[in-house]
Image: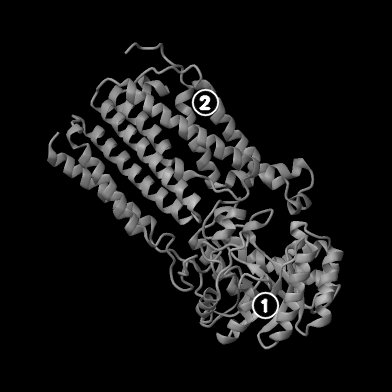
Amino acid sequence: MSSARLLLCTFAVLLVHASVAWFVNQPRDAGVDVPAGKLMSLSFAPFREGFSPLEEIFPPKEHVDEDLSLLADKTLSVRTYSSVGGGMENVPELARKHGLAVIQGGWLGYGYLDNKKEVDALIKSANANPDVVKRVIVGNEVLLRGDMDVDRLIGYIREVKRVVKQPVSYADVWSMYMKHPQLIKEVDFITIHILPYWEDEPVSVERASEHLEKIVKQVEDEARGIAPGKPILIGESGWPSAGRQRGLAVPGVVNEARFIRGMIQVATRHGFDYNIVEAFNQPWKSNLEGVVGANWGLFSADRKPVFPLTGPVAENPDWLTHFAFAVLIWLTIIAACFKKIQFRSLPSLLVLLLFTQLFSICLVTLAHFLWYTSYSSLQRAYTVFMLFANVVLLVFLIQRYLDILNRRPGAGALAFKLKNAYLFFILLALYKTYGLAVAGRYLSFPIEQFALPVLGIVGLVACQWLASGNIKGCDLGFDQLCGWNIGGRHDRLIAYGLSFAAIAMVFGETKAFLDGRDFIQAHPGLSEGLPVALSYALYNQQLLIWLACLLTLALPFWAKARPRVEE
């Protein structure tokens, strides 16, 4: 093989890679630009990375001041969720400094003493800062969580109303106001959360604005018969920029921009009062709600805009840097393998170049996504470990590709390494799938972690096909792909396990929809609900890709093992 041909093929593959990367990462239309001026309100919590209310590691006053200074140019007011500790007691004072109004919240739970402290602090703050604290919210989604019953909640609402001058409300998902209409009488304004992504029947971003209008109208109709004309605040509405897909609802930077812009258009058109969730991404929420819970902000955890409010929006604005790293890794692989690339056929050369390029993209994508969605030392250690595991497998795969394409006999040592590496990824895939099937509401599909192993199987098949010259004569058993019969008595169990995991994944995703309270009300009976829930599950593109990953990993283990060959 001449160096000129290698150089020409490398350039051709690089050109294709560059063209696809450029096309895929072009900024996209995200809807009508947000009108000039400030947003009405943003949910505010000043917890940067390393701070967490769960661990009682609270931010200093300087962080609160810096955050409110940043938000002063973006919004008219901020909504808080707690009045005790965590630097939140400083919010009214600092909001006054930066010209912001405050919707002051008090966090309620199941603990009586904690609730008493919150209510006392809420009352104190509201009465001490009437020029800044314009509205008060007693409790947030306490009924949704089941922390207390509605009568006890009403008691807290009445207690606060007696001693503050500001309008008082309670905030929960919109369906809770429909379920407990007596709340409408008790509050001075109705605060509802409308989160299309989290609905029991998730709403696509294309229909989210329509859904918003429909829900507000529904609540208005309910309130009209109880307390005509009572104001409604959309207390939370937003869209995640990263995380797992739910039915029709797909997280993403572009989709978050589309939703926010569409929501503001609807609010402006109808005169809705709204609060966007949220100002900043909250790393600590990943402990409760996974990647998706930590990525609802207009600003990232390091206080950079996630997307612009005007103009086209790029899903990955750093794509050029990622492209450069992928190319650098790819060229390093080619240089390391240069002496062994002695293929007579052009297809063999192109297959090797193509798969090594895909592996490079997988490594960069894995490193970027896992690092971006790691919020602790333990999570970052896992990121480094998974990157290392993928690199090790990459080395084994390339050695095997070179053996196959150069028509060299397989090596037992390499075959053992390859099989052990794949057994590690298969066991991890089974563990991940178990979590997704049993309690996957907040778990992301680990596609990036397994893209390289899955493509590795495809590459082994492609190389075997080229080496045999006939797809019908290509043996797809795992031992044959590895190049050595290393004993496969239990290989069929691996195939069964992965295939069963794929079925369990579909069952778990479907059951999660069937268990939703609002879903049950809308679709009573299994015969009516099952087709709808199944359609939501199977519409999930992330789920389908993960199923394809599981089945691809299982494919070589379905083949019968050939008789052992002595070394």
Closer to us: mark 2 or mark 1?
A: 1
| Quadrant of residue 98 within the rendered picture | bottom right
Give the label on residue 103, or none: 1
Q: Is residue 448 above or below residue 560?
A: below
Q: Which image quarter is the C terminus in?
A: top left
Q: Residue at left 52%, top 60%?
A: 241
Q: Is residue 126 above or below residue 474?
A: below
Label 2 sits on a secondary structure element that is: helix
Q: Residue 164, percent across and down?
A: 78, 82
Q: Is residue 410 left or right of residue 161?
A: left
| Quadrant of residue 88 within the rendered picture | bottom right
Tally the marks.
2
Q: Residue at left 55%, top 81%?
A: 38
Q: Is residue 325 left or right of residue 529?
A: left
Q: Residue at left 50%, top 65%?
A: 301
Which is more toward the observer, 210 or 549? 549
Q: Type of residue at label 2?
A: Ala
Q: Type of residue at label 1?
A: Ile
Q: Residue 64, percent across and down?
A: 55, 75
- Near mark 2 (Cα within 10 A), the count class, few <14, some 14-19 or many ≥20, is many
Q: Which residue is mark 2?
A: 495
Label 1 sits on a secondary structure element that is: strand
| Quadrant of residue 263 within the rendered picture | bottom right
